[in-house]
Image (tube, helix red, strand yellow):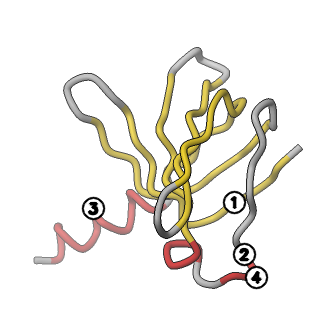
Amino acid sequence: MTFVISCACMKDKNAISGKVISIENGKDGYTAKINTDKNEVYFATISIVNLGGPEKFKRFKEGDEVSLKGEIWKTDTEKHIKVKEIVSVK
């Protein structure tokens, strides 16, 4: 059981940085497609609930340079991050 908890905590420390290339609005927030410095594409889910409240929520625009922390997972063809912290937006 301790191992499972440790792995979950480590996932939250994952971070990405890159440029917003598109945005798709959703019911509780939006998904931003991010192209990282390593030319990897991530689908970042940004919602008020995952960020911990409306005061931490920010709306990105295409072209913004962002740094994000959260839980990263991969499917066969895509990389995703459930954003828990918006570190910076430029």
Which one is in front in this view, the residue at disc 1 or the one at disc 4?
A: 4
The residue type indicated by label 1 comes to: Ile
Q: What number is the disc on residue 57? A: none
Q: Which residue is mark 3?
A: 7
Residue 25 location (% of width, % of height): 55, 52
Q: Does residue 23 sit above or below 26 in this rendering? A: above
Query: Residue at the location (80% across, 30% down)?
Result: 63
- Quickly name the residue at label 1: 86
Left or right position of 24 against 66? left
Q: Nearer the viewer, residue 34 or 39?
A: 34
Residue type of the residue flagged with mark 2 = Lys
Horizontal side of residue 60 vs 11, given as left or right: right
Between marks 3 and 4, how big is the CA–CA gap? 28 Å
Residue of label 4: 55
Task: Return the residue at label 2.
Answer: 56
Q: Quadrant of the C terminus?
A: top right
Going by the numbered disc 4, the residue's amino acid type is Glu
Q: Secondary structure at mark 4?
A: helix
- The x, y position of residue 44, in whole percent, is 51, 46
Name the residue type under label 3.
Cys
Distance CA(mark 2)–CA(mark 3): 25 Å
Mark with earlier residue (3, 4):
3
The residue at 52%/48% (across/down) is 31
Q: Residues within 10 Å of mark 2 (few under 14, many from 20)?
A: some
* The quarter of the displayed image where residue 29 is located: bottom right
Judge depth for marks 2 and 3 and give the one in front: 2
Residue drawn 20% across the image and 26% down it:
76
